[in-house]
Amino acid sequence: MKRSTGRRLRSWWLVCASVTTMSLAVAACGNSEDSSSASSGGTGGKGSKDPVSIALLASSGASYSQAENKGAEAVAKAAGGSVTVFTADLDPQKQMTQCKDAIASGKYKGILIEAVSSAAAVPCAKLAAAAGIKVVGLSNPIGPKLQVPIQVPEVSGQVVQDHDKVGRTAGRMVKDVCKDKDPCQVVFMIAVPGFPASEAYKAGLNEEIESAPNIKIVQTYPTGYGDLSKAKAALQDALVKYPKLSVVTSDADWLGGAEQLVKDEGLTDQVTFIGTGGSRVGTDAVRSGAQYGDIPYLPRTTAGVATKMLIKAVRGEKLDEPAIDAVTLSPLGRIGIVKKTAETFKAQW
């Protein structure tokens, strides 16, 4: 959670691009209800192959989330079903209202939840289950903890990012860049302060680099998802305060404005960028050398797997693996996108 200019630099300034994680950018926010189809769902039941009508509660209208929507729609259509997208604009209360509306409509046999807040999504899952509607989590876990295993019995399955581990991956990249620099000053551009996914990412990043005494995060700037101007303004401030700045990293994929500023100032040999989300723009930046690395997210694949899971749950079929760490769907796993892996990585947003 996003996400492509938008996730342009969730490769940097992606969620309304991806962290998504990230999204885990808000570049292209849609209407609160973007109906790709509104036909009613089938009766479901064990062994039933009736079409399944799904409500997808998207966290935002970011390009990353839009890629997820397309992945879900493709799988549902192939199974004879449909997806209606509700966009919460990163507002957990709005998402809860949309959940209640979807349930009350009687149109849906399944709900995919890309939770704005993992804990705040629990009541939605419980209300849906009470109405006989199956629930699957997408990208962000459903429950009090940001973890991959299912925490809420009303949730049939989830395909989600472990944002703490994503932050740790970014931290390992930071350590690679900083291994010969002492001190190594780092700026962290956080997508949404207080947003559970962003905070978990930040915690993982901090935990990973705390073993390296030469590395210090000198400042954290809130930059949102997909706002290139905020990234640029943040870096302008940072370069004044920290003229020996070495690394800029983010839980989003929108570092374009910041990268251009570094280029304009002739500091490309001094300041290194690390993004999150694996957008096309971010991946291209790694290939060109403008960015050291990025963390691969596959929004279409992730949503497709979650949708297949939901359809099986609605039809009463057994889920062999009800909780999936989304990073395992990428051929790169937690290696990350760096120069030697970028050539073969296929971005999905």
Image (cartoon, rainbow, N blue to C red):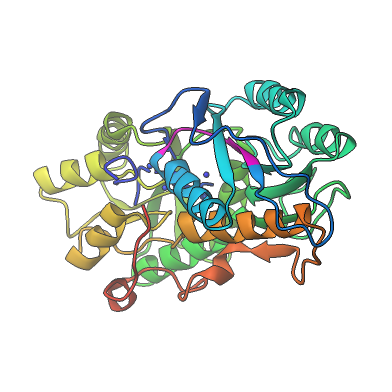
Q: Position of residue 4 (x, y in %)?
A: 29, 45
Count all numbered tags in the image, as a single digit. 0
Quarter of the image where one finds residue 108: top right
Range covered by the magenta-colored residues: 54-62
Quarter of the image where one finds residue 96: top right
Quarter of the image where one finds residue 223: top left
Q: Is residue 148 above or below residue 236?
A: below
Viewer-proximal residue among 46 and 344: 46
Residue 58 is covered by the magenta coloring: yes
Q: Is residue 217 above or below residue 309?
A: above
Viewer-proximal residue among 95 and 168: 95
Q: Position of residue 212 (x, y in %)?
A: 52, 66
Q: Residue at x 56, y 62 (%)?
A: 168
Q: Residue at x 17, y 41 (%)?
A: 261
Residue 344 is covered by the magenta coloring: no
Is 256 on the left or on the right of 41, as rendered? Answer: left
Q: Is residue 22 visible?
A: yes
Q: Is residue 132 above or below residue 336?
A: above
Viewer-proximal residue among 154 and 2: 154
